């Protein structure tokens, strides 16, 4: 038996982090869903399991429901089993009651009840549909243990948080559920990262949804050879977009070059959403700042989205540019210290400080002087 395990499509995603590129991010999810259909056909999958959160919520636009139905209909004749998750639980008047959803063709099955379902080839599926957004109960509790002599392949399909962490989670699922219930494979949705825990697998979201997600953009292609055998699970990359969160500290031009290489390694700029957080040292030379600004300008033009969170240090004013009095005196004392001289008065107490600290003080002094001048 070979099948494709996917989930967390979240069609109609608002994509707030994508800012004015949210429309392109939403479109990518439909393109990726079509790629999943291609993967299923190429792999000659017996069926596809969609492990919850097909939709972002019950308030998605009607057009998003219609387009999702159109994509699911493309999977024919491959059977697709759709599980309601915590974003799109089975509730009266929800997305599953819409007339547009009812246009799915006969190969698409909405799993509305926690009861065994015979699959093609004589295997059995134990679906665990959700009926609310939050609950502390394990949705897989109902799955019966394998009876003696049962040689069928047994699959579980659920949406929730596997209990691998000590804290309680929404819809917590026992870590050993697959073993205690005698399941050959437990297909899970909810976590957006690809994770394998023996027979229990999170396929992750096929399209990354935020900068802090890791190992997203995949589906799982699964093979089972017989009851009790370990599943052969292969990760198949299908994601269209790449989200990168980069951090750097700029002290000299080599730091900017390193950042440029990281951006280049992210692949096609037209498919890249990047968030760059830079801390610019007060001692960074002008050529490093110039290089950094050039890098920002280039990637702002080429990337799908660039969120640039870098603040250059204030320009250090020359002593003669500062007003007479305490500002100018302090600037002259700091300049003397930077030149290795030992001024008299209060400045003598800081002559042993790190030169970088003294340079930062000079820039801060310039900022204060400019604010006073306003």
Image (cartoon, rainbow, N blue to C red):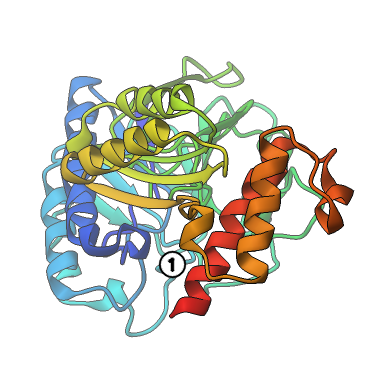
Asked if residue 215 lies left or right of residue 49, the reply is right
Does 99 sit above or below residue 308? below
Q: Secondary structure at mark 1?
A: loop
Quadrant location of the C terminus in the rendered image: bottom left
Q: Residue at x 37, y 60 (%)?
A: 17
Q: Percent from the top left, x then y, of residue 150?
A: 60, 29
Quadrant location of the N terminus in the rendered image: top left
Q: Percent from the top left, x then y, of residue 169?
A: 69, 60
Q: Is residue 373 among the parts visible in the rendering?
A: yes
User: Which of 181 and 296 lies nearest the eye of the viewer?
Assistant: 296
Does 337 sit above or below residue 329? above
Does 294 sit above or below residue 157? above
Q: Residue at x 54, y 32 (%)?
A: 251
User: Which of 285 and 177 lies nearest the eye of the viewer?
Assistant: 285
Q: Percent from the top left, x then y, of residue 345?
A: 85, 57
User: Which of 46 and 37 lies nearest the eye of the viewer?
Assistant: 37
Q: Percent from the top left, x then y, of residue 140?
A: 63, 53
Residue sticking out furthest to the right: 349
**Residue annotated with mark 1:** 87
Q: Residue at x 12, y 65 (%)?
A: 66
Number of marks in picture: 1
Residue sticking out furthest to the bottom: 93
Asked if residue 168 lies left or right of residue 261, the reply is right
Q: Is residue 181 among the parts visible in the rendering?
A: no
Count neighbours of disc 1 (C-alpha within 10 A) and say few if under 14, some if 14 to 19, many if 20 or more. many
User: Which of 254 and 266 lies nearest the eye of the viewer?
Assistant: 254
């Amino acid at each position: 038996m070979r099948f494709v395990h996917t989930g967390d499509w979240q069609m109609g995603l608002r994509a707030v982090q994508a800012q004015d590129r949210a429309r392109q991010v939403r479109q990518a999810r439909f393109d990726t869903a079509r790629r999943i259909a291609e993967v299923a056909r190429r792999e000659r999958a017996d069926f596809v399991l969609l492990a919850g959160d097909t939709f972002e919520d019950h308030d998605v636009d009607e057009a998003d429901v219609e387009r999702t139905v159109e994509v699911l209909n493309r999977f024919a004749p491959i059977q697709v089993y759709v599980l309601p998750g915590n974003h799109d639980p089975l509730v009266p008047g929800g997305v599953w009651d819409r007339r547009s959803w009812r246009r799915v063709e006969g190969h698409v099955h909405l799993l509305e009840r926690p009861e065994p379902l015979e699959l093609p080839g004589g295997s059995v599926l134990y679906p665990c549909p959700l009926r609310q957004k939050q609950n502390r109960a394990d949705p897989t509790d109902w799955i019966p243990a394998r009876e003696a002599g049962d040689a069928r392949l047994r699959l579980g399909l659920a949406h929730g948080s596997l209990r691998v962490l000590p804290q309680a989670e929404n819809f917590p699922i026992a870590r050993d559920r697959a073993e205690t219930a005698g399941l050959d494979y437990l297909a899970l949705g909810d976590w957006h990262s690809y994770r394998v825990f023996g027979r229990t697998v999170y396929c992750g979201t096929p399209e990354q949804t935020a900068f802090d997600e890791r190992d997203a953009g995949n589906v799982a292609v699964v093979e089972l050879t017989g009851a009790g055998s370990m599943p052969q699970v292969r990760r198949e990359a299908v994601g269209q977009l790449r989200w990168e969160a980069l951090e750097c500290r700029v002290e000299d031009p080599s730091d900017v070059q390193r950042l440029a290489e990281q951006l280049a390694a992210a692949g096609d700029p037209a498919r890249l959403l990047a968030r760059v957080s830079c801390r610019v040292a007060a001692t960074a030379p002008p050529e490093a700042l110039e290089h950094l600004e050039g890098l920002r300008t280039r990637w702002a033009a080429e990337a799908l989205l660039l969120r640039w969170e870098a603040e250059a240090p204030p320009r250090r004013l020359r002593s003669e540019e500062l007003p007479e009095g305490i500002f100018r005196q302090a600037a002259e004392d700091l300049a003397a210290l930077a030149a290795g001289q030992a001024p008299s008065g209060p400045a003598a107490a800081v002559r042993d400080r790190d030169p970088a600290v003294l340079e930062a003080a000079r820039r801060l002094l310039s900022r204060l002087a400019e604010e006073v001048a306003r």
